[in-house]
Structure formats: C-alpha cells, structure tokens
Image (tube, rainbow, N blue to C red):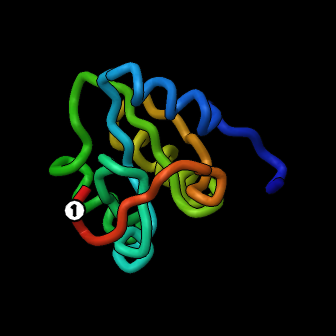
C-alpha cells in the first residue's frame, strides 16, 4: 500500500495476544488519535514525544510492536528507538489494518 512491508501481520499479532505472548504494543500516534481508538492493551508513546518519554514507556526485556495509522510513523519511531539503544522492535503497520476490536479513551 505504501511501498514497504511490515514485520508482522495484524493477524499474527492478534494470535500472539490471544496466546498470551508477553509483548508490548506501542501506539505512536498523537493523543487525540489514540483516544479515538487503539488496540486494547497498547501503551501510548506519541512520535512527537518519543525522545522525552521512551524511557518511561518502553518496557525492558520484551518485544515491542509499534503501530500508527498507516505504518509510516511507526517506521520512523522504530528507527528512533533503535538509535536510542532499544532492540526487539517490530513495525506492525497501521491500525487501519486492524480488523478487530478497538478501545477508545486514554486507558490502555
């Protein structure tokens, strides 16, 4: 769709969540976008605040699945987090590709 592929499909992510795999979902969209609908259980780390808030949000010792609306901002976030020394980072694309339930509001 945008000329690049993602590290996991949304179907694979859903299967891992349903199986109880210890992963961290990170939504890198802006606050209003997160509140309007996000994957249940996703932490919020807006790309615009990434450098300032990464240490407080990104969990250690687990895979980090990043997403945004379409996959472009999550690609940028992955590069920035990698430059900050984080690993086990995966761009899973955009919430537009998430066909499952979404949660609204600021609670994950």
Residue 84, position in %: x, y?
34, 43
**Residue 12 as seen in the image, left or right of residue 62:** right
Residue bearing mark 1: 107
Image quarter (top left, top right, bottom left or bottom right) of the N terminus? bottom right
Q: Which secondary structure lies at badge 1? A: loop
Q: Position of residue 26 (x, y in %)?
A: 37, 48
Residue at position x 30%, y 47% from top?
41
Q: Is residue 83 above or below residue 50?
A: above
In which quadrant will I find the C terminus?
A: bottom left
In the foreground, 37 or 72: 37
Quarter of image, res 73: bottom right
Q: Which residue occupies the foreground of this view, 52 or 14?
A: 14
The outermost residue toward the left is 56
Residue 71 located left or right of residue 46: right
Q: Give the image quarter of residue 35.
A: bottom left
Q: Residue at horizontal 60%, vertical 54%?
A: 94
- Side of 106 relative to 38 (left or right): left
Q: Position of residue 4 (x, y in %)?
A: 77, 45
């Amino acid at each position: 769709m945008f000329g690049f592929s993602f590290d996991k499909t949304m179907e694979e992510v859903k299967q891992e969540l349903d199986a109880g795999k210890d992963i961290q979902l990170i939504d890198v969209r802006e606050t209003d976008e997160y509140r309007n609908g996000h994957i249940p259980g996703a932490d919020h780390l807006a790309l615009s605040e990434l450098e300032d808030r990464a240490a407080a949000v990104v969990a250690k010792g687990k895979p980090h699945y990043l997403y945004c609306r379409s996959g472009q901002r999550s690609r940028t976030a992955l590069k920035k987090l990698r430059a900050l020394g984080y690993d086990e980072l995966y761009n899973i694309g955009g919430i537009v590709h998430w066909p499952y339930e979404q949660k609204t509001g600021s609670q994950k």
